[in-house]
Each structure stands twice: as structure tokens, then as C-alpha cells.
Image: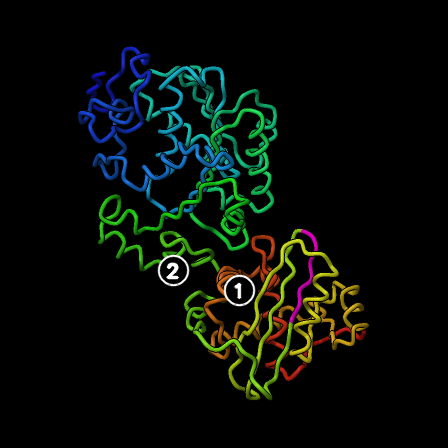
Amino acid sequence: MSLDLPPGDAVADPADLKGIPFWPGPHAPFKKCCFNHAVGLPSKNGRQMPIFGYERRIVAALAKKKDRAKARHVWVKKATGLGVTELMLRYMAWLCYKSDEFSGAQMCIVTGPNIELAKGLIARLKEICRPLQIEKTKETVAILNGCRVEAYPSHHLDAMRALARPAFILLDEADFFPSKEQQNARAVAERYIAKSDPYIALVSTPNLPGGLFESIEKEPEAGCIYHRLHLSYRVGLGTIYTKEEIDKARRSPSFEREYNLKYGYGVGNIFPYQLVDACSEEYGLALCKDASRVLAVDPAFGSSNFAIVGIEQPAEGGLMYVKEAREYQRPSPSAMLEVVARFARHYPTVLVDSAHPGVIKDLLEMGIDARPVLFSKELQEMTSSASAAVKEKAIRIHPAFSDLQYQLKAAVFNDKGHPDKTRLKFDMGDCLLMAVHYLRNAGGLYVVEA
């Protein structure tokens, strides 16, 4: 095969692409070897770019067949600007043209809840395939060698539930889908695994802690169906990025999130990440004698997590130290009562969200000093008190409690001056609000009489 085409020239017969590799092997003749040279290399600022090593890692993960459960499935948490979305579009196009295997099949691209995003990705796909003289279609559809590639906004996925033979499903910037749409998008993609065994690619820059990407990242390796790849800016330094570009990007408050894969950075306005970082340090997690201690509990047995935070204050009015910060997903009530009872042996006071009277009643019957906290009365004061404690560096949070730190950094005010929980799971954050306010006000929380 000898395809040596400058970008933009038309391939007279796309049948010439049959059997062509995606990228040349180590011994292939340069520019006469692969799909990407045939259609024209990707470019940045007018300069052509090869397929870099980190991109070939993604392609290799998609092609892996050794682990059957993970075959064809990738999860890519990536820095912005690495070109991963472009890579996915090119890989989908290559699959369509390298053989007729997917003629008559469908490929799906899921974007955020904006039809313009869907149109934009299809426009990019059509531009990649422009040398192949593809047929004209509507703005959300491309037909590539008989395969129908269609883009769907995340809030309109009903049409994706009735496809005959989906061959590839890309969820692009999936961590930025609205929280109620994230799990639905994943479910719609994965429902076809047993039917047509499609390629599934979840690609995103990280957004908020507790979202789709973090939940998959925390899945045990044995139970996760995705090859998980973490691509920070470092993999592209000296290739897709210059040192000067990264130095300039570092000035942004969102650099850690956009380029260094940290959830929530640069998003929150209640606990600015610089202030949370200033409160983060290592210290002993063993409890001290004669210290004030309080355990805060935010029970949940449904979509939220059951959260527990324990804080110790060795001297009255002195520094507070977070000694416990844990979350439990979908636990049984009896198991969590045992966990709280175990912690309560060392924490004389246990604060509990008053929205869970059954848990409070059970703890009281176990002889535990469980105090119901009325969030509707105290939330604004608790938020102000905790925010002030962080600003004043009156609290220390161990680096081991990174999930708590992420929640704080991502928290934003709603129009009532409270943490906006429609965008973020803030279960440990709520516990910290209760505990800090209790210690800073000598137990002066508004509690409900048991």
C-alpha cells in the first residue's frame, strides 16, 4: 500500500484503506503506512503532530484482549489539551474504514447537555474524514463506510436505548455531565456489552469529587470493567505542550484540576483550595489524652454516602485535628450502627443530622450521647464557622483524608449561602461543618431535644 497524501487531498477510492493500520509499526515506511497519514495528521497551532506515545497507550488498551472483562473498554482521566478526544474520533473513523466489519452498525458519541457540543464533535469527525469524500448528512450524524456515527446530548439518550448493533460508544468529558445524567449515560453505554460487545471509551478531565469518574476510579481492580489510564500534563510535556505553555497555565486557579488530575480544584468558593492546602499537614492520628473530641455522623442508605468525621482539640480554643474521615457506600443500617458505636467509645459526643431520627434513637438506646443537629436552623452558621476555621488555619487535615479535602475544595455557595449539594456529594463536608462549629462554640449547636 502506498498512500502518500498531503492533508485535504481526496482518496479516490476509500477501499484502498482496507487493512491499513491506525499508526505505523516500527518498520513501516514513513508516510506510506497508516490511516492517520492518509487523512492528514492532527495539528496544533498550524503544526502537524504525530500520534504520541501516551496516545498509543490508549490505542493499545482498546486493543487488549487478554482480560476479557476489560476488553475494548477504557477510562481515561486526562489533562486538557492532550488531544484525546481527537484521538478517539480518529480511532472510530479508522475502525469504520479498515474493513467492512462495522458497515450497517452504529457508533455513538455522548456529549454534555448541549446540542451544539454534539454538532461540534461530528463536525470534527467529518473534517478528519474530508479526504474520503463522505456523504452529506445532518449536523449530528456522519456516515463512514456504511457505519452511522451519531452524537447525542447527555439529556436525550432515549434514542440510544434501541440501537441494533452499536460498535463504539464514546462518553466525552463525561465527568462534566450533570450529576443526574452521569450514571444514566454509563448505564446506557454498558447495557450493550452482552448484546454487541461495543468499544466503550469514557474520556474526561476531572470535575467534582464524588462524580462518575471518581466513582469508577475507586472501583476495585478486580471488579472494574475498564482499563484505567491517568494522563496528567506530564505525559505531554515536550510534545503536545511546551514548558512555556505549562508555566503560563500554572497561574490559573484551576491548573491542578485541568492539568494535574485533581478533582474540584479551582471550582469551590467556600473553602478556596489554597486555604485547604495550607491546613493540610501530617500529624499523628492516635488520639490524645484529655482532649476535647466530637464525632459527626451524616447517615445515608441511598444515593448519598454514610459519612463519619472525628475531630480532636487538645487544648480549649487551640488547633483542631481531623482524626477520622470516612465514607461508606450503600451500607446496611445495622453495620453502620456498630461502626458508630465503636468510634463512640473514644468520642464522648456524637452529632447526627436530625433528618435521621431512627439512627439517633438506636444510638441513644445503645447508651451513646447522640445529639440531633437541625441543619435547617444551623447550616449557615456551621458553614461560616468551618470556613473561618480553614481561613484562620485553626484546623489541620491529614493528607490521608484526601476525599474530605476534595469535597471542601469543590464546595460552592448556593443562593441561600449554603453548600450547593446539587452539584457535589458533600457528606464528609457536612460532618466537618457540624464538628467544627460544635468545638468552636463550646457545644453551642442548635440541637433537637431527643
- Residue at screen point 28% across, 40% down: 53
Secondary element at image label 1: helix
Q: Point out the image quarter for the N terminus.
A: top left
Residue occupying the far left of the picture: 29
Label 2 or label 1, whichever comes before in sequence order: 2
* 1 is higher (above) or lower (below) than 27: above
- Residue at screen point 35% across, 34% down: 87
- Residue at screen point 32% across, 37% down: 56
Residue 384 position, x and y percent, is 57, 72
Residue 361 position, x and y percent, is 80, 69
Residue 44 falls in which quadrant of the image? top left
- Residue at screen point 20% across, 17% down: 2
Quick one: label 2, few (<14), some, or many (20+) residues within 10 Å? some
* 173 is higher (above) or lower (below) than 38: below
How much space separates mark 2 and mark 1, taking CA atoms? 19 Å
Give the label on residue 253, or none.
2
Give the label on residue 217, or none.
none
Residue 93 position, x and y percent, is 38, 24
Q: Does the magenta-highlighted stretch encompass residue 293?
A: no
Residue occupying the far front of the picture: 66
Q: How is the image coloured?
A: rainbow
Residue located beneath label 1 in the image: 404
Residue 376 position, x and y percent, is 70, 66
- Proximity of marks 2 and 1: CB atoms separated by less than 8 Å: no
The answer to whether any part of residue 70 appears in the image is: yes
The answer to whether any part of residue 417 appears in the image is: no
